[in-house]
Image: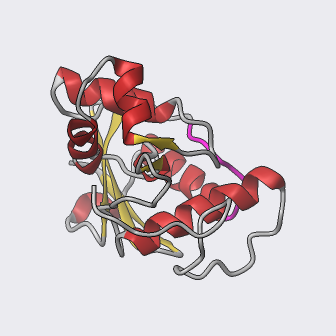
Amino acid sequence: MPHITLHTPLGELTVFEDDGAIVALDWGRGAGADDAAPTPLLREAAAQLQDYFDGQRTGFDLPLNPQGSEFRRKVWDALRRIPPGETRSYLDIAREIGCRSPRAIGQANGDNPIPIIIPCHRVVAADGSLGGYSGGEGAATKRYLLALEARARTGAPTGELPLSSPPPGGQHQESSR
């Protein structure tokens, strides 16, 4: 499957394409010869991710085709509607899509195959605590992404964002989903 690996402040990320759409983003380096000749879509995805990490972009304009059940796709669509630099609770997402279980939202969130681009990091616990995050360094990565978006949204220089940066609006306690 065609893919491209890029260096980011969070380490290497590998983006995968299938049939003209982005289907996955994984933490770490992808293996294989396809990495040497990325497709135009993969080059665009890499450019948009670099702009995101440089604080020049807060959202993505890419064709996506995450593979999952109808329910999971509904959750992932709801995540894409959360404005950059803002958060919603698992309960908020459950209510939006007509689901009775915030836990099911958390499970779908954790199974998101295209993190960052489908912004599962924007979902927090109902009490405002950070909640879990399955990518990168876990909660530290989630804090980093939220702080990055808050700075980009306000136009503040990104500078060095340590992975221990608190999210916008104050310090959140970490808890599991």
Q: Nearer the viewer, residue 129 or 134?
A: 129
Q: Which residues are magenta?
A: 54-60
Secondary structure predominantly adopted by residues drawn in magenta: loop
Magenta stretch holds residue 56: yes
In the image, residue 32 sits, relative to residue 78, either above or below, namely below
| Residue furthest to the top | 98
Residue 163 seen in the figure:
yes
The relative height of residue 60 versus residue 51 in the rendered view (above or below) is: above
Residue drawn 40% across the image and 47% down it: 120
The residue at 34%/65% (across/down) is 175
x, y percent for residue 118: 42, 42
Looking at the image, residue 117 lies above or below residue 79? below
167 displayed left or right of 18: right
What is the count of numbered marks? Answer: 0
Using residue 69 as the reference point, say whether residue 7 is left or right of it: right
| 120 relative to 105 in the view: left or right | right
Residue 149 left/right relative to 66: right
- Find residue 168 and report its horizontal and vertical position in percent: 66, 60
In the image, is residue 70 above or below residue 122? above
Please identify the quarter of the rendering in which residue 59 is found. top right
- Residue at 20% in and 37% down: 104
At x 42% / y 28%, what residue is drawn? Answer: 78
Furthest residue in direction front, as rendered: 127
Quadrant including the C terminus? bottom left
Question: Residue 1 placed where, x, y %?
Answer: 20, 48
Q: Position of residue 14 (x, y in %)?
A: 34, 61
Colour scheme in use: secondary structure
Q: Residue furthest left?
A: 69
Q: Nearer the viewer, residue 67 or 96?
A: 96
Q: Who is closer to the viewer here, 165 or 159?
A: 165
Q: Is residue 20 visible?
A: no
The image quarter containing residue 76 is top left
